[in-house]
Amino acid sequence: EVQLVESGGGLVQPGGSLRLSCAASGFTFSSYWMSWVRQAPGKGLEWVANIKQDGSEKYYVDSLKGRFTISRDNAKNSLYLQMNSLRAEDTAVYYCARRMAAADRYNWFDPWGQGTLVTVSS
Amino acid sequence: DIQMTQSPSSLSASVGDRVTITCRASQTIGNFLNWYQLKQGQAPNLLIYAAYTVQNAVPSRFSGSGSGTDFTLTISSLQPEDFATYYCQQSHSIPYTFGPGTKLEIK
C-alpha cells in the first residue's frame, strides 16, 4: 500500500524553527518528485514546495523562499521540510504528497499524507 | 501566478442530487486541472486529474470536464460520503495554485 506519514509538527514560538518529516512506503520513493502542501485553519490549500527525484531541483512558493527548505533522503525514503523564522501565519496542517506525472506533462498530487499540525504561537 | 476561483463557495444538497462545481483559471491552462476532495481529519483525496481523467477507485458518479480556463466537477448522484470540501488545482505552471474550495453540505 502506498503510504505517506508526516511527523514533526507541534507548537513553536514565533521566530523558531521546526523540521517536518514524511516517511514514504509502498512505492519507489527515489523515482518521484515530492511536494509539501499546507492548509491554514479555516483556509484553503497552498502549495509550498517541490523537489526532484535526486534533489537537484527545488521549487518554492515565492512567499516562503529563504525561510523554508525542502530536502529528501532517498536511502531513508524520507522527505523533509525545514522551517525557519516561523510566523503566526505559518500555522497550518502540512501535508506531504507524491507528485505524479504523465508523459505529456500533466501532473497531480497522489497520494497525500494525513498531515501534521504546526502551530506558531507564544 | 495563475489565480483559481471556484463557485459556489458552499452548496447545500440532498442525497441523490446532481451537483456541479465550477472552477475558473485566470489564464488558459489547457487541461492542467485536478480536483481533490478533503474531509476533516483525513488526507486529501485525488478525484480527477488532467481535467477529466477519473482516478482509479474513484466512483463513476464523479466526472470532470472543461479546458482552457473553465472547468467543472460533477457528482451525478450525491451519496452521504460525498459531503466534503472540493478543491481544484492548476498544474500548468509553478507556483501550483488551488481554488478556495467548495464546501458541500447536507440539506
Image: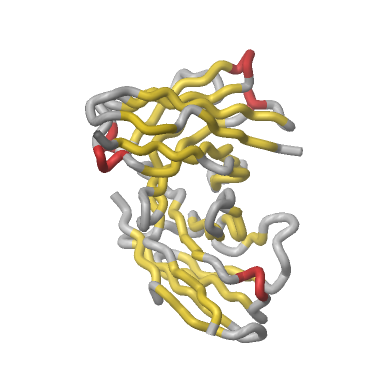
Q: Is residue A8 visible?
A: yes
**Eyeballing the image, is B91 above or below A83?**
below
Q: Is residue A72 above or below residue B98?
A: above
Front one among B80 and A36: B80
Along the line of sight, which residue is nearer the eye, A68 or B84?
A: B84
Question: Quick one: B47 or A115, which is closer to the camera?
Answer: A115
Q: Position of residue B7 (x, y in %)?
A: 39, 74
Looking at the image, residue B37 sits to the left or right of residue A67; the answer is: right
**Horizontal and vertical percent for residue B17?**
61, 86
Tally of numbered discs: 0
Q: Is residue B24 above or below residue B75?
A: above
User: Residue placed at 56% from the left, 16% from the top?
Assistant: A73
Q: Seen from this angle, which residue lies furthest front? A: A122
Residue at horizontal 24%, vertical 34%? A122
Would residue B93 be visible to someone looking at this image?
no
Query: Where, by quadrant of the figure, is residue B94 drawn?
Result: top left
Front-most of A105 and B49? B49
For this view, does A96 lie left or right of residue B9?
Answer: right
Locate residue B32, reporting x and y percent: 49, 54
Rendered image quadrant of residue B23: bottom left
Q: Which residue: 53% across, 57% down?
A: B40
Quadrant assignment, res A114: top right
Percent across and percent down for residue B90 are 44, 54
